[in-house]
Image (tube, rainbow, N blue to C red):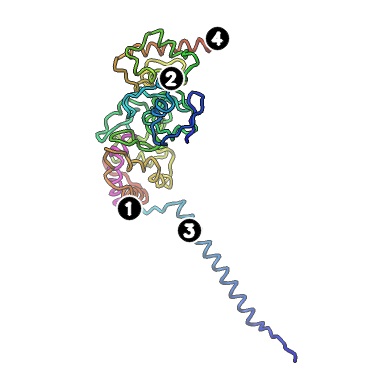
Amino acid sequence: MITITVNGKQHQVDADPNMPLLWVIRDVIGLTGTKYGCGVAQCGACVVHLNGDAVRSCVTKLSRAAGQQVITIEGLSENNNHPAQVAWNEENVPQCGYCHSGQIMSAAVLLKENSNPSDADIDSAMAGNICRCGTYQRIRKAIHLAAELQRKEAASK
Amino acid sequence: MKHQIKIPVKAFAVVSVLLMTVGIMAFALHSDDKKSKVHASMLPVVKKDSIASVKAFKQVYTVLTSARCMNCHPSGNIPLQGDDSHLHTMSPQRGIDGKGVYAMKCSNCHQPTNTPGLHTPPGNPNWHLPPANMKMVFQGRTPRQLAEQLIDPKQNGHKDLKKLIEHADDGLVLSGWNPGEGRKLPPMSHAAFKKAWITWLTTGAYAPKGK
């Protein structure tokens, strides 16, 4: 049995330590918001947070996540109200939507580390998340809006 | 009947002196041995030989400029990738500490061990580029430039001779010889590289002539 904490809830997982974290999240725990894209860390659809870092769960073994904190798109906010989620809605970013849980999870790490990212910062942070619908311009716009929402939220506290 | 035990005083004194002498000598010899070992490990012996040194560096250069070493010692801030050393897809950035930026940190894809499968991300627990303030560029350096850079403490991470020798066994250096499936190995074994590296350093670390 391997213990991992996903979205604040502890799970005892009876699985091979070499199993990709993505399979554990989707097939064992049943959280299907995180998507399978390429399986070789090339597209970013499977990004989750491991102790706050945006790891690609398709190549991250369960053993690396043992005893650690994992956050998936389902646990990013309590009411789907993380500034990135709000901004994504506001800007109607997704087209087919398949890549966007990964996109939002990557954007969330950027926003955590940089409260006012430039276009260049956004490009550096998001370069590993591919969108076959080509929504990149809307992604960039939404991240700027999310940063603004986040700053306003911080100022109101 | 009265038995009297005679103690051979002279013989006893001679044996005692001999034993003490042997003891002192053993201690002294052991101490010298220990001292010399410490001395050897702390200060590598340099016996200058410019011809042997330059010859050894030519071998070192072929390894350092092979894809397995050079790909993480780029001239720019994006690592290189593949046996042809093209710019790394996705354009990950070096970052201040050499470990990437934001959602594009090296360890987000590069796991502690190689990922199984052809051309999948190779792994190491300490995957990184040299930091922004000490880039240690291999790409595009001539043999002379690279040799001079490697032994300059201001450019090599403040490494002295001993630390440079030790660096041949660094975990990330060794991972060049365990690159994952589908990647070409450096042009010689790690043992041959280490021998050439140490030979170059201990014969005076001469830089080849030319630019």
Q: Position of residue B9 (x, y in %)?
A: 67, 82
Q: Residue at x 34, y 17 (%)?
A: A98
Task: Give the residue number, with chain letter if any, for mark 3.
Answer: B36
Q: Nearer the viewer, residue B133 or A80?
A: A80
Q: Is residue B17 above or below residue B127?
A: below
Q: Position of residue A57 (x, y in %)?
A: 39, 28
Helix, strand, or loop for circle 1? Answer: loop
**Proximity of marks 3 and 2: CB atoms separated by less than 8 Å:** no
Q: Nearer the viewer, residue A85 or A115?
A: A85
Q: Amino acid at mark 3?
A: Ser
Q: Is residue A125 above or below residue B40?
A: above
Residue B126 located within the stretch drawn in magenta: no
- Looking at the rendered structure, whether the residues under marks 3 and 2 are on a common chain is answered as no
Q: Amino acid at mark 2?
A: Ile
Place residue A73 in its image quadrant: top left
Which dot marks residue B49? 1
- Looking at the rendered structure, whether the residues under marks 1 and 3 are on a common chain is answered as yes
Q: CA distance from mark 3 to mark 4?
A: 68 Å
Place residue B104 in its image quadrant: top left
- Label 2 or label 4, whichever lies nearer to me, is 2
Helix, strand, or loop for circle 2? Answer: helix
Place residue B72 in its image quadrant: top left
